[in-house]
Amino acid sequence: MKLVVRVKLLPTPEQAAALAETLHACNSAAGFVSRAAFERKVFSRAGLQKLVYGEVKARGLSAQPALHVIRKVADAYTVLHAQIAVGLLGKPGSRRRARAEGRPVRFRPDAAQPFDDRCLSWRVDARTVSIWTVRGRMKDVAFTGEPSQLKMLAEHRRGESDLVHRDGRWFLAATCEVPEAPLNADPADWIGVDRGVVNLATTSDGDNHQGRGLDRYRRRMARVRAELQARGTKSAKRKLKRRARREARHAAHVNHTIAKTVVADAQRTGRGIALEDLRGIRDRVRLRRHQRATHSSWPFHQLGEFIAYKARRVGVPVLEVDAAYTSQRCPRCGHVSRTNRPSRDAFCCVVCGLAGPADHIAAVNVRARARTAWAFVNTPDAAVSPSYRRGSHEPQTRLLEGVVDVDVTQVTALGIGELARLTGVPVRTIRFYCDEGILEAGRTYGGHRRFGPDAVERLRTVRRLRALGLGLPEIGRVLAGERSLAEAVAAERAALDAELADLAWRRASLRAVEEADPAERARRLDLLAAAERGAAARDALVAFWRGLVVAQVPPGLMEAFLHGTVPDPPPDPTPAQVVAYAEMVALAADRSLARTLRAGVRRAAAEIADEGALMLGAHEASAMVRPAVAAGRPPAPGPALDLFVEAHATARDTRDTPGFRRRLLRTVSAGQDERMDRYWRLHGEVTGDPVTLGAAQSWLVAALATTCPPPSE
């Protein structure tokens, strides 16, 4: 395996000046090659060498440095094109991507420059190097490093070295090819490692490497960074760059320490190391604003890389397992639930009662999954590793044939990835449906979901119903057989009709305010605010009329009474209808009108024995006079009036006599109010029918007055 050893150069002032001139000359030539490559659209090493090799040498560079400059430019464009291809520089048309594609790659004057053994020779025993510069070959340039670095240089250095100038200091980064120890193919067990933010690494042995110190260091660096950013000077920007590198070195040191400890434990005990597969975790989670900086600076990938390369050096196997639900699964009974982890630090199984630190439980689950996966990989006749089975059933079939004698055509268990591929539903959505109880899934020992053959059609049904707008609770009742599909669709259509009616009401209200005179607009806005929804406005009118009925009335008769007194909100109202309905609500909210009407009702109730019969007779009489009212005929005695008087007489347990008619006229006349006349006119505007129940009652009262002449003096 290849490792990089960086040693520090100790040049004299003359040597440092020559090295600086060399870097400037090489990077100036690199800028020239980059511009030529961008203009000619030639990015390969061979193409650039044919294009600019002679001109680069003419700039004062020898043959090998000139070739290294050309290769450095070609490699830079290769990296740039790869970043563009995978979307690291933004989507097509974005500002960042357009800037990257619209100009050549630029090189800093002090950017690193590679040297091979023809341009750089090492004398490790004397701790000096001989290096090519634009001033000629410079010998006896001293360097220093740790004893372990010097030993690795002497034994394993191979290939190129990079000359680096940073913060006024000079370094050489040398490539070393270090042999790997034989891999332990039969580990005694596994050390599960759970990586986190609060605890950077927690092992299944109970070792906890906390991130508290690193977090405090980052917060302190953030405060210093904010102060320097507020200054905005050039020196402040230079200090910001130095502090950013210092912070990165500190985090790397912490990760090196953790990785070294974990690998040393695994090597000493003959075990392997199991890590969670955390790829894509930054894209799968949604964070609050105060969590973004902490999460984006979480060095979990670097820690995994350090553990992996240190383990390779000593022959310790490293295995990555699925990270799903490792902190929610009970390692004793296998129960998986969010309630198993009531807080970030605590775990308590709601089934068997197992409790402990959540990160330690997660590490134990990682170890268990590594045991299962390693046994699966090393099963006799296993064709491929389990990771290959994601897109094909054939390897899984051959593996099953090697383990037990089964009919492979009956193997119907589907993984969550296979189910997502067959249905087109994202994996995260399938997990959500499982958590909500819409889909049923079994669990393997490693905690992976397995779905039956009916899951595909069930998931497609869920997807179709979701496309129609049905909610998950309703879909769950349909799938459970508690409700038919027709009933669910009808209920959803009714809810949609109600929503459309509310939207039509709002639109008419907005138009009513918009079309009002400027002087009238504020009053109309207050008026419509009391009836912002049609259904709520109707409920207010129903409550008003129910309050005027003081006796017990059969439900059917009460519904008929409310149907005649309270209009339904129009499905597609005009602004005038909305304003009229709002004025009716305002009249119903008038407390003085309600008190007056209730007082008259209570006085009449003392005489009335059967209010239901009275309401029925009055309703029939009103229906009889509708044609006369609609035709505009003047009030006159007739069968309708006789029915009206007979209903009142029967309700009062008396007979229709001239004296009763005079008393009845005084009673009904006392109950009339101009505001109620206004209510019935508004009722007609809303319904579009001027013959309202109130208009019919007024016609009957006027007809009664024609049969009761005033007494002669």
Image: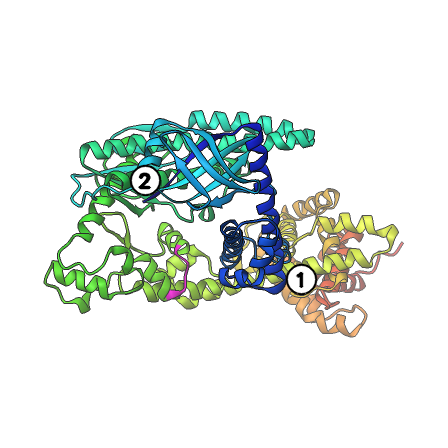
Taking the image as shown, residue 275 lies to the left or right of residue 660, namely: left
Mark 2: amino acid: His
Mark 1: amino acid: Ala
Which residue shows up at 59% across the image and 64% down it?
Answer: 41
- Please identify the residue farthest to the right as the structure is shown: 713
- Per the rendering, the mark at residue 504 is 1
The label nearer to you, 2 versus 1, is 2
Which residue shows up at 61% across the image and 54% down it?
Answer: 58
Q: Can residue 291 be seen in this view?
A: yes
- x and y percentages locating residue 263 in the rendered image: 27, 34
- x and y percentages locating residue 605 in the rendered image: 63, 48
Range of the magenta residues? 423-427
Residue 361 belongs to magenta span: no
- Please identify the residue farthest to the left as the structure is shown: 405
Q: Are marks 2 and 1 in contact (CB under 8 Å)?
A: no
- Which residue is tagged 2? 156
